[in-house]
Image: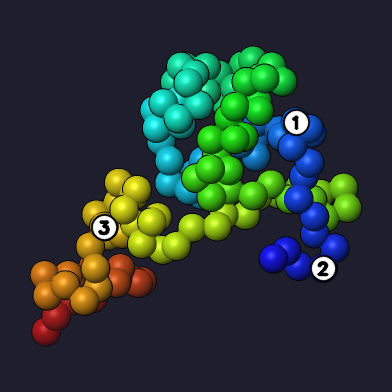
Amino acid sequence: MLPTGVEAVPASEPVPAFLLQAARTMLGISQAELSASASVSKKMINDIEIARIAASPSLGARLREALEAAGARFVRDGQRLGVVTVSARHEVAARSRSPRLSESPSDASFVAPPAPARGRPRKLV
């Protein structure tokens, strides 16, 4: 359910490349994974994301469909466009390449990293 004043972007409307990239990043999907699910080369996705080329309407629709199948929702609030993700935390952790997300805090081997030191180092007397 979307908040008041926020509506889904119609499927017939193209989604800008920066939102496609934001959705992919938020979902924790690599360009290679998106290329496999959308049946397009990884180079093509990279070129679209860095605005080297513009996606054709059919390619943009395939990328959007693949991202929506993974849990992305493209939304509008007036003239502003955005993306939200609908994924459970365990689904994101399962797709993540980060060792911190793939480990469970309840696991006995899980140790939080130490907090970074602040200020200048002090001499111990």
Instruction: Using the image, determine if residue 2 lies above or below residue 60.
Output: below
- Residue 21 shows in this picture: no
Disc 1 residue type (three-letter): Pro
Quadrant occupied by the C terminus: bottom left
Side (left or right) of 5 relative to 110: right
Q: Is mark 2 on a helix, strand or loop?
A: loop
The residue where tag 3 is placed is 102
- Name the mark nearer the viewer: 3 or 2: 2
Q: In which quarter of the image is residue 101?
A: bottom left
Name the N-terminal-most of marks 1 and 2: 2
- Residue 66 shows in this picture: yes
Q: Residues within 10 Å of mark 2 (few under 14, many from 20)?
A: few
Q: Residues within 10 Å of mark 3 (few under 14, many from 20)?
A: some
The residue where tag 1 is placed is 14
Side (left or right) of 79 relative to 20: right
Q: Residue furthest bottom?
A: 125
Quadrant occupied by the N terminus: bottom right
Q: Name the residue: 29% across, 72% down.
A: 115
Q: In which quarter of the image is residue 122?
A: bottom left
Q: How many marks?
A: 3
Mark 1 vs 2: CB contact within 8 A: no
Give the CA distance from mark 1 to mark 2. 23 Å
Q: How crowded is mark 1: few (under 14 residues within 10 Å), some or many (20 or more)?
A: some
Residue 100 — which label?
none
Disc 3 residue type (three-letter): Ser
The answer to which of 118 and 92 lies nearer the viewer is: 92
Q: Is mark 3 on a helix, strand or loop?
A: helix
Name the N-terminal-most of marks 3 and 2: 2
